[in-house]
Image (cartoon, grey):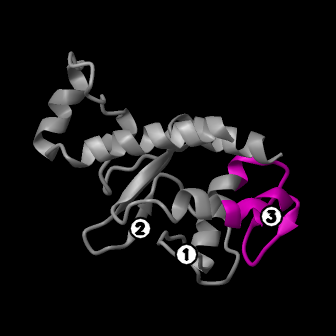
């Protein structure tokens, strides 16, 4: 679990660094390696804006969450599981149905087999059982504008809970 905490800490530090950089300079910084040892280099996932999220990045990079200008949540993966009819995925600082739905949709591709039928779709029993702890650790702490949960962090968290 310590390893997961270290990965989360590194991810949050990089995200904070990305928030301080104006959008115009991000592309220049991505292409030029940082020469300053104290500066955190931006990771590719942080450069995604709400309107250019690519589903292919989910399996390669991990979760990328952003808010559109109207405040609606956007992700780099589709919602395939509905725990409750008409409840879509979202994140906030409090646990709710939308958070649990988001957590299950993140965990489901990483946890076969899908044996549990829900309102719409199927998922694994482990995804249903671990959705709340995952949401409390990763989603309740996600900034309002969005963030990233690297694939390796998700996999390490799953290993640590098994």
**Residue indicated by mark 2:** 73
Q: Which of marks 2 and 3 is nearer the N terminus?
A: 2
**Residue indicated by mark 1:** 88
Query: Of discs 3 and 1, which sits in the foreground?
Result: 3
Which quadrant of the view contains residue 135?
bottom right
Residue 116: x and y in percent read 86, 66
Q: Nearer the viewer, residue 72 or 8?
A: 8
Q: Residue at x 26, y 25 (%)?
A: 38
**Residue indicated by mark 3:** 129
Answer with left or right where residue 120 lies relative to residue 48.
right
**Name of the residue lying farthest toward the bottom:** 85
Total labels: the figure holds 3
**Residue 131 covered by magenta stretch:** yes
Per the model, the C-alpha gap separating discs 1 and 2 is: 9 Å
Q: Which of marks 3 and 1 is nearer the N terminus?
A: 1
Whether 50 is drawn above or below 23: the answer is: below
């Amino acid at each position: 679990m310590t390893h997961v905490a270290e990965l989360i800490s590194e991810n949050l530090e990089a995200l904070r660094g990305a928030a301080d950089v104006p959008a115009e300079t991000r592309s220049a910084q991505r292409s030029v390696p940082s020469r300053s040892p104290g500066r955190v280099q931006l990771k590719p996932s942080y450069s995604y804006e709400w309107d250019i999220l690519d589903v292919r990045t989910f399996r390669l990079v991990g979760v990328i969450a952003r808010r559109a200008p109207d405040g609606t949540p956007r992700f780099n993966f589709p919602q395939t599981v509905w725990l409750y009819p008409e409840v879509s995925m979202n994140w906030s600082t409090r646990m709710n149905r939308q958070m649990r739905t988001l957590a299950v949709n993140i965990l489901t591709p990483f946890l076969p087999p899908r044996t549990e039928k829900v309102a719409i779709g199927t998922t694994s029993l482990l995804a249903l059982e671990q959705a709340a702890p995952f949401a409390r650790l990763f989603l309740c702490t996600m900034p309002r504008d969005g963030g990233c949960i690297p694939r390796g962090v998700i996999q390490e968290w799953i290993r640590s809970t098994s």
